Image: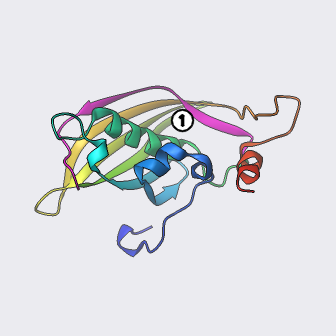
């Protein structure tokens, strides 16, 4: 999807029941198996005592892009892919009012394990992307732990459909 032609947000079933991403104001711009591009605007309540983005907000933003890239939007819902670990390198501070973009890409997938790289940027004054942080996530695909327990055939998609009622 060309980011310039995006006219409406792209949906992902995971976001139907994700109050953290909703609170952050995350918008999905591009989504495919192994890839996600998201944006959010940095608000006053996302800043630390120095008036710059709280590191936890940047991490949470990168983690959301990671989760979206790990979990195909058109999957059957019988499994979910979760983080087994992640780390972030902060390169530059983000400021109030900046629009941040996170681009997540799968780098490796072996069996149920994967590695994803997420680059978090803001737009520089010359219009080019200004790299704020580099996030690396390690993932594991597991059976969906449906709320009703293992004796049922509840999938992630069934649970999401149920919460939308």
Decide which of 36, 146 is in the foreground and name it: 146
Q: Which colour scheme is used?
A: rainbow
To which quarter of the image does residue 40 belong? Answer: bottom left
User: Looking at the picture, does residue 99 appear above or below residue 134?
Assistant: below
Q: Seen in the image, is 32 located left or right of residue 96?
A: right
The residue positioned farthest toward the right in the image shown: 151
Query: Image point 58% across, 44% down: which residue?
Result: 71
Which residue is disc 1 drawn over? Answer: 109
Percent of width and height locating residue 92: 17, 40
Percent of width and height locating residue 129: 21, 55
Q: In which quarter of the image is the N terminus?
A: bottom left
Decide which of 150, 115 is in the foreground and name it: 150
Q: In which quarter of the image is the C terminus?
A: bottom right
Percent of width and height locating residue 14: 60, 48
Residue 151 falls within the magenta-colored stretch: no
Q: What element carries label 1?
A: strand
Q: Seen in the image, is 72 located left or right of residue 161?
A: left
For the magenta stretch, what is the residue range? 77-97
Label 1 CA crowd tier, 10 Å (few <14, some 14–19, many 20+): some
The residue positioned farthest toward the left in the image shown: 126
Query: Image point 39% across, 43% down: which residue?
Result: 61
Query: Image point 46% across, 52% down: which residue?
Result: 36
Percent of width and height locating residue 57: 34, 39
Query: Image point 53% across, 30% down: which residue?
Result: 139
């Amino acid at each position: 999807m060309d980011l310039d032609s995006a006219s409406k947000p792209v949906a992902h079933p995971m976001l139907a029941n994700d109050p953290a991403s909703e609170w952050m104001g995350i918008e999905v711009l591009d989504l495919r198996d192994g890839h996600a591009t998201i944006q959010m605007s940095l608000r006053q309540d996302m800043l630390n005592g120095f008036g710059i983005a709280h590191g936890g907000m940047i991490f949470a933003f990168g983690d959301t892009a990671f989760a979206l890239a790990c979990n195909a939007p058109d999957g059957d819902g019988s499994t979910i892919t979760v983080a087994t670990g992640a780390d972030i390198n902060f390169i530059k501070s983000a400021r109030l009012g900046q629009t941040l973009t996170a681009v997540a890409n799968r780098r490796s997938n072996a069996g149920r394990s994967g590695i994803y790289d997420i680059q978090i940027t803001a737009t520089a004054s010359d219009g080019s992307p200004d790299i704020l942080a580099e996030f690396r996530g390690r993932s594991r695909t597991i059976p969906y732990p449906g709320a009703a327990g293992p004796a049922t055939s509840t999938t992630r998609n069934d649970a999401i459909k149920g919460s939308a009622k």
